[in-house]
Amino acid sequence: VYHLGWLQDGNPGYELNIAFDNCPGQNKNNCVLRLVPYLIEMGWFLNVNFMFLVVGHTKNAADRMFNRMKKTYRVSQSFTMEMLFEQLQSEAVHVLPVKEGDMKDWTTFLSNFYRKLPEIDKMHIFSCKKE
């Protein structure tokens, strides 16, 4: 979000809340959780909360949005990614195409600063606040 211009140096967002609909114990989520203190330490947010929904209770707004998008693209004639992006764009959905070079090896980068969190599968909410 920083490179998109949504955040500026010296002007942190007050709070970032992200809800995940999968288990916190998955390996990829241990990496994602290391983003919580990183976003605070970089000065991009004052409060960060990552919430993993309880299994079986994941019918949330994101699920409904993905289901609505699925209905759209299943009946459309999309022959290129650009056509698909155009068909999915709406007031509620802003498609941001991922380009080569956009993806970074965050696991390796964050491992330089933060250790792996043990037993995260027992917890569902992870928070960090700037002091």
Image (cartoon, helix red, strand yellow):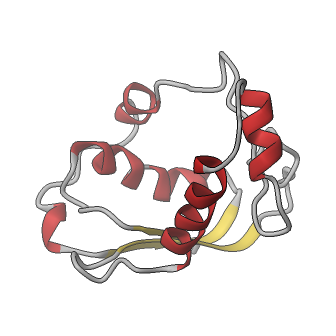
- Nearer to me, 115 or 27: 27
Q: Which residue lies furthest to the top in this view?
A: 100
67 in relation to 26, above or below: below
On-image quarter of the C terminus? bottom right
Q: Position of residue 92 (x, y in %)?
A: 77, 69
Q: Can residue 40 be seen in this view?
A: no
Q: Is residue 29 left or right of residue 61?
A: left
Position of 60 with respect to 84 (left or right) is left
Question: At 52% from the left edge and 65% from the top edge, which residue is drawn?
Answer: 67
Please indicate whether residue 22 sits to the left or right of residue 15 in the image: left
Q: Depth check: 102 or 109 in front? A: 102
Percent position (x, y) of residue 9? 84, 50
Observer able to see residue 114: yes
Please name whichever residue, 21 or 118, is drawn nearer the observer in this view of the structure: 21
Q: Give me the residue at 35% from left, 77% from top.
A: 58
Pick whichever, 124 or 65, lies toward us.
65
Which residue shows up at 33% across the image and 76% down it?
53
Q: Position of residue 30 (x, y in %)?
A: 29, 49
- Where residue 59 appears, as percent x and y from the top left, is 40, 80
Q: How many marks can you see?
A: 0
Q: Would you identify the image quadrant in which residue 23 lies?
A: bottom left
Residue 71 falls in image quadrant: bottom right
